[in-house]
Amino acid sequence: MKAAKVYGAKDLRLEEVETPRITKPADVLVKPAYTGICGSDVHLYHGKNPLAVLPRIMGHEVAGVVEDFGGEVKGLSPGDHVVIDPISFCGKCYACRHNMPNVCESLLVFGVQQDGGMREYFTIPEKQVLKIDKNLPWKEAALIEPFTIGANAAARGNVGIGDTVLVEGAGPIGIAALKLAKIKGAQVMVSDVVDEKLAFAGKQGADITVNTAKTDLEEAVREWTKGEGVNKVIDAACTTPTIEAAFKVVSAAGTIVFLSFGEEAAKIAPLPITKKQLTVAGSRLQTYQFANVIRLMESGALRGGDLVSHIFPFPDIQKAFDFIDAHPGEVKKALLEF
């Protein structure tokens, strides 16, 4: 079978490797149908993912079919459609005991510290395999994992009915956060510097959009919220300016949620945090969000819309990464088709 492995910055090799087989009784053999290319995969390909261990088969946004399984697997049948929860955790450390296995001290992530789904077959423990309705289109199923990231950000922000929410960044994760915040009953402003992305966010349910390259964000927030400030900020742009802006536009008693893995320091004064009694939260991956997102997807309450903009055959994976590098403004979500 073929597998795509990154050995170093821009060193991606499509290799012929042995097809895996079931060796552990709780494992499942999965054949991907689609694997999404995440922004973190692009960073890994460029050698800029500080958490990745190389060489590595990337890919954690996977929807596929059950091919085989070990003797201890009880909840699956051959041919079932499934998605993959990419996190593996110990269940015993402080984070796990406090229902945050996504930051387990022994965390391993499929496609980052473990080989992922950019290959024609893989085995994975049953506990990381979630069955989905076969009627759910594959292109929608492939978006379940990124939507769990948006769901986790909304949960970390305690987004609720009537909240005003600013989502900074109209990329795939920003759109996911927008959709989950709307489902929770919030009003949502989306900011970005690309008009086309903002137009797409408007079609996906944003109540208002702001191009911060053309309009002052603080002024736009003041006008929209009648001077109160937004109750919640979800920073899906993950830049130093968006981090710093969050503290300026959030309301008293508000919450800011960061998704950035950036290592560059941002200049933040403690005064607004204390004066407004803010809650500042990080959001990494997801915690127990798959069941909810799958239910929303299967019911039709959550859909990807036109978020999938490009599909590449798996053998053309190098072309896919080259295209994303050359045309970042054109790509919303790219998928590899098996």
Image (cartoon, grey):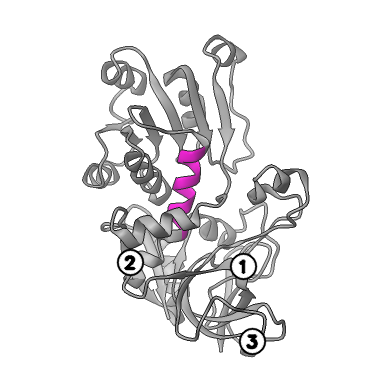
**Magenta stretch, main secondary structure class:** helix
Image position of 78 (left or right of 323): right
Residue identifier under label 3: 20
- Sequence order check: which comes first, mark 2 or mark 1? 1
Query: Could you say where residue 273 lies in the image, as x and y percent from the top left?
Result: 57, 16
Q: Residue at x 31, y 73 (%)?
A: 135
Give whichever of 39, 138 is nearer the camera.
Answer: 138
* Residue type at the position of mark 1: Lys
Report if the CB atoms under discs 2 and 1 are less than 8 Å apart: no
Q: Where, quadrant-wise, is the C terminus in this rendering?
A: bottom left
Report if the CB atoms under discs 3 and 2 are less than 8 Å apart: no
Q: Residue at x 23, y 43 (%)?
A: 199
The Cα atoms of the two marked residues, 2 and 1, are separated by 31 Å
Crowding around mark 1 (Cα neighbors within 10 Å: few <14, some 14 to 19, many 20+) is some
Crowding around mark 2 (Cα neighbors within 10 Å: few <14, some 14 to 19, many 20+) is some
- The answer to whether residue 282 shows anywhere in this view is yes
- Sequence order check: which comes first, mark 3 or mark 2? 3
Instruction: Give the residues in magenta.
Output: 145-155
Q: Which mark is residue 310?
A: 2
Mark nearer the viewer, 2 or 1: 1
